Image (tube, rainbow, N blue to C red):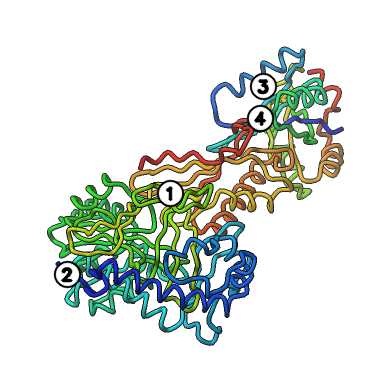
């Protein structure tokens, strides 16, 4: 049983509540003073920081939505002066506007701490060789795991994504012991390993941490058997901090939330009512140690449930179940967040009216594929094949630059995409989770 | 001088072509010439019919995406070299050809070639000058 931070990970519920309450009070004061959005919201609700005495008062505070981040793009919700922001990351949002997050030096330290717990729970230590195959860049995956891996003293291989044959060669030559990437990429690596005729026993891989997209027990079993490793689920989102919000321990029975930093709640997505332990609902997080971008009751749109029972691993931190769906229409394709409405805005820009479209998401082999059907219209039609192909290409390029992933575009005859009375069914997801 | 050609967008699904020709048949519209430009996912059906405006209207009513293009119909001698002669004339005048398709007409010893060119007026002038017969639209519709 290896903990990175036994004091926090095995803290009594009583001590945890006290710690959370102190930190919550400080955070509420901070945002009230420094973030106009929160001050206004609290005043509208007739609330002052003094009204919050403990975590029991958390439910009185207003929710924060992704839209709030978009509306205050880029730095409107930051609580620290920009001179103290040492890192900026971003994740995808609808209409091409990214949601921007910022970190102070202390936030980076916090991030390292929670990632250190994550990696330690997966069996890593200072003798590990950690291959970070998450993308490095504005995406929080790569750098998040990287800094956590350095924190525990492991040897970090910052390879980022892509070039799979090279990834495998490096795994072999550098003696990687822990792999960090998306689960579907892990499966792709496993497939490529077979193609290269490399036996998994030639590698020193022992474990992996996988997240950024939904994955099933079935996928876990496949990854574990094909790579000969123990595969751990990790959960995070940039707005809360990035990877490191929650992680599986060796019991693999729920993900432990670093609740001394992020207080979770489960709410009814329709009414906003807080639901009791064990109920399924929308996951909400309140950050209580972040300085750059503290968030009060941030609605994740992920559906999960909580249990406060002590885990067999000895950790007392609350566990969340593997997220099993979204309350909005966001998709995760090849690890990238995609909102169908982004497609609409791209098409609107190309034509004069938004044509009818349909997204077909599938898994071809081990990688997600996206095909977008677009109905042909008079204004788009040309007698020349070349012109239509140019249009297809233009749409494909625009979509790729807006979404960040490539999609196949197929032009179809008018009226072939189903119309509906209410909200149009824009997505057919053929993947079986 | 210019012939109205109907272009119809078709997905690469079976039955689409049959449906279009069926609709035209049911509405007493006769097809003089037909060609299909195909790609992996879709095709453009190009038709010369005897009643182009009506054909356009009816196909649109049935939900097809239709457009009209002006093309030239040229009669070349149905002998080896007949087509090459016409093409040389256009090439010498630097007239680019977008596409063409040819078919043997009812008139004896004549093959009919439909051209879509960048500059139809210039093409007609240059062909006339070289005694290559450009057919008037009405004649093509009656074929």
SS at badge 3: helix
Q: Which quadrant does the N terminus of chain B fall into?
A: top right
Q: Residues within 10 Å of mark 2 (few under 14, many from 20)?
A: some
Residue drawn at x 66%, y 30% as measured from the top left: B45
Q: Nearer the viewer, residue A335 or A31?
A: A31
Q: Residues within 10 Å of mark 3 (few under 14, many from 20)?
A: some
* Vertical position of residue A54 compared to residue A221: above or below: below
Tell me how far mark 3 sits from mark 1, CA to CA. 52 Å
Q: Which quadrant does the C terminus of chain B fall into?
A: top right
Residue A2, which numbered label? 2
Which comes before the other along the chain, label 2 or label 1?
A: 2
For disc 2, the chain is: A
Residue A161 % position (x, y): 37, 64
Q: Are marks 2 and 4 in contact (CB under 8 Å)?
A: no
Task: Using residue A166 as the reference point, say whether residue B103 is left or right of it.
Answer: right
Residue A281, which numbered label? 1
For disc 1, the chain is: A
Task: Using residue A395 as the reference point, say whether residue A105 is left or right of it.
Answer: left
Residue A100 % position (x, y): 53, 70
SS at badge 4: strand
In the picture of the structure, the residue carrying the numbered disc 4 is B45
Tell me how far mark 2 sits from mark 3, CA to CA. 71 Å
* Vertical position of residue A55 compared to residue B62: above or below: below
Do the residues at discs 2 and 4 belong to one chain? no
* Tag nearer the camera, 2 or 3: 2
Residue A327 % position (x, y): 49, 48
* Tag nearer the camera, 2 or 1: 1
Residue B20, which numbered label? 3
């Amino acid at each position: 049983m290896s903990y990175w931070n036994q004091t926090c990970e095995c803290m009594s519920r009583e001590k945890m509540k006290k710690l959370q309450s102190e930190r919550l009070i400080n955070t509420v004061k901070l945002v009230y003073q420094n973030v106009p959005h929160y001050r206004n919201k609290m005043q509208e609700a007739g609330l002052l920081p003094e009204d919050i005495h403990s975590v029991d008062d958390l439910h009185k505070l207003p929710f924060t939505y992704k839209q709030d981040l978009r509306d205050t793009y880029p730095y409107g919700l930051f609580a620290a002066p920009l001179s103290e922001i040492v890192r900026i990351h971003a994740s995808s949002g609808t209409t091409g506007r990214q949601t921007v997050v910022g970190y102070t030096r202390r936030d980076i330290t916090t991030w390292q701490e929670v990632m250190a717990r994550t990696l330690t729970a997966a069996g890593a230590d200072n003798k590990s060789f950690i291959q970070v195959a998450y993308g490095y860049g504005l995406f929080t995956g790569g750098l998040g795991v990287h800094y956590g891996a350095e924190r525990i003293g492991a040897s970090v291989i910052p390879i980022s994504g892509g070039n799979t044959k090279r990834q495998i060669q490096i795994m072999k030559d550098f003696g990687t012991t822990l792999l960090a990437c998306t689960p579907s990429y892990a499966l792709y690596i496993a497939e490529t390993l077979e193609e290269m005729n490399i036996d998994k026993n030639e590698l020193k891989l022992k474990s992996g941490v996988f997240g950024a997209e939904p994955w099933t027990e079935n996928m876990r079993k496949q990854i574990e058997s094909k790579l000969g490793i123990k595969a751990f689920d990790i959960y995070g989102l940039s707005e809360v901090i990035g990877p490191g919000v929650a992680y599986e321990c060796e019991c693999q029975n729920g993900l432990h939330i670093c609740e001394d930093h992020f207080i979770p709640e489960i709410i009814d997505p329709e009414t906003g009512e807080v639901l009791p332990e064990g109920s399924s609902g929308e996951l909400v997080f309140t950050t209580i140690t972040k300085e750059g971008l503290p968030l009060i009751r941030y609605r994740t749109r992920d559906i999960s449930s909580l249990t406060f029972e002590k885990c067999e691993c000895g950790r007392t931190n609350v566990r969340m179940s593997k997220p099993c769906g979204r309350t909005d229409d966001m998709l995760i394709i090849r690890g990238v967040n995609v909102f169908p409405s982004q497609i609409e805005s791209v098409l609107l820009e190309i034509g004069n009216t938004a044509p009818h479209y349909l997204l077909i998401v599938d898994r071809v082999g081990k990688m997600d594929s996206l095909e977008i059907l677009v109905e042909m219209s008079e204004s788009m039609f040309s007698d020349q094949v070349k012109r239509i192909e140019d249009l297809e290409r233009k749409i494909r390029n625009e979509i790729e630059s807006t979404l960040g992933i490539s999609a196949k575009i197929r032009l179809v005859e008018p009226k072939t995409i189903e119309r509906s009375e209410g909200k149009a069914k824009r997505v057919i997801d053929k993947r079986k989770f | 001088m210019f012939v109205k050609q109907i272009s119809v967008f078709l997905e690469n699904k079976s039955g689409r072509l049959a449906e279009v020709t069926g609709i035209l048949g049911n509405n007493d519209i006769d097809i003089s010439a037909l060609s299909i430009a195909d790609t992996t996912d879709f095709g453009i059906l190009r038709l010369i019919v005897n009643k182009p405006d009506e054909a356009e209207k009816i196909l649109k009513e049935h939900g097809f995406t239709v457009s009209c293009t002006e093309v030239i119909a040229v009669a070349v001698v149905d002998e080896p070299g007949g087509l090459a002669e016409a093409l040389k004339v256009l090439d010498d005048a630097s007239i680019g050809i977008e596409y063409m398709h040819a078919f043997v007409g009812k008139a004896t010893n004549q093959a009919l070639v439909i051209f879509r060119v960048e500059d139809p007026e210039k093409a007609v002038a240059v062909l006339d000058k070289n005694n290559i017969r450009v057919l008037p639209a009405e004649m093509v519709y009656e074929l």
